[in-house]
């Protein structure tokens, strides 16, 4: 699968690049650069280190919570029933 680095100008007239997958989905967007040469230099840097880059997980642990609001009439299993008329 080949990715594409696409250079573009953002709303503040700065140069940025985005990494697209082979189907055109956006995978990453860079910070802003004052000129195209700086952006191209960092694309080269990303190419060098991304393929061998390690993944570090800095996410906060997620604990399950009861998402049923207090006083809710929705059953815990999430199934709705029509009220008797």
Image: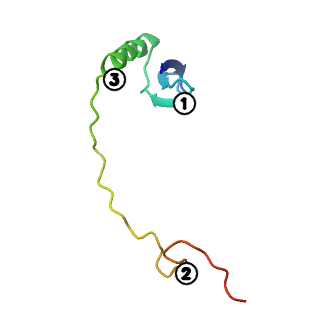
Which quadrant would residue 24 be assigned to in this image? top right
Structural distance between the alpha carbons of marks 2 and 1: 41 Å
Q: Identify which residue is drawn at 73% across, 89% down.
A: 85
SS of the residue at dot 1?
loop
Residue furthest right in the image: 85
Q: Identify which residue is drawn at 38% across, 67% down.
A: 65
Instruction: From the top left corner, tell me how far across and down residue 67 is, in percent.
Output: 45, 69
Structural distance between the alpha carbons of marks 2 and 3: 50 Å
**In the rendering, which numbered label is found on residue 25?**
1
Which residue position holds label 3? 50
Structural distance between the alpha carbons of marks 1 and 3: 18 Å
Mark 3 or mark 1, which is nearer the start of the sequence?
Answer: 1
SS of the residue at dot 3?
helix
Horizontal placement of 53 versus 35: left or right?
Answer: left
Instruction: From the top left corner, tell me how far across and down residue 64 is, in percent.
Output: 36, 64
Crowdedness near tag 1: few (<14), some (14–19) or many (≥20) residues, C-alpha within 10 Å: few
Which residue position holds label 2? 73
Instruction: From the top left corner, tell me how far across and down residue 45 is, in percent.
Output: 33, 16
Q: Is residue 58 above or below residue 26?
A: below
Mark 1 or mark 2, which is nearer the start of the sequence?
Answer: 1
């Amino acid at each position: 699968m080949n990715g594409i680095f696409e250079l573009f100008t953002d709303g503040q007239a700065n140069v940025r690049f985005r990494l697209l997958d082979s189907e055109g989905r956006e995978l990453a967007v860079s910070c802003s650069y004052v000129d195209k040469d700086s952006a191209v230099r960092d694309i080269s840097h990303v190419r060098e280190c991304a393929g061998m880059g390690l993944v570090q997980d800095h996410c906060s642990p997620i604990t399950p919570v009861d998402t049923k609001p207090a006083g809710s009439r929705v059953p815990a299993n999430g199934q709705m029933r029509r009220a008797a008329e």
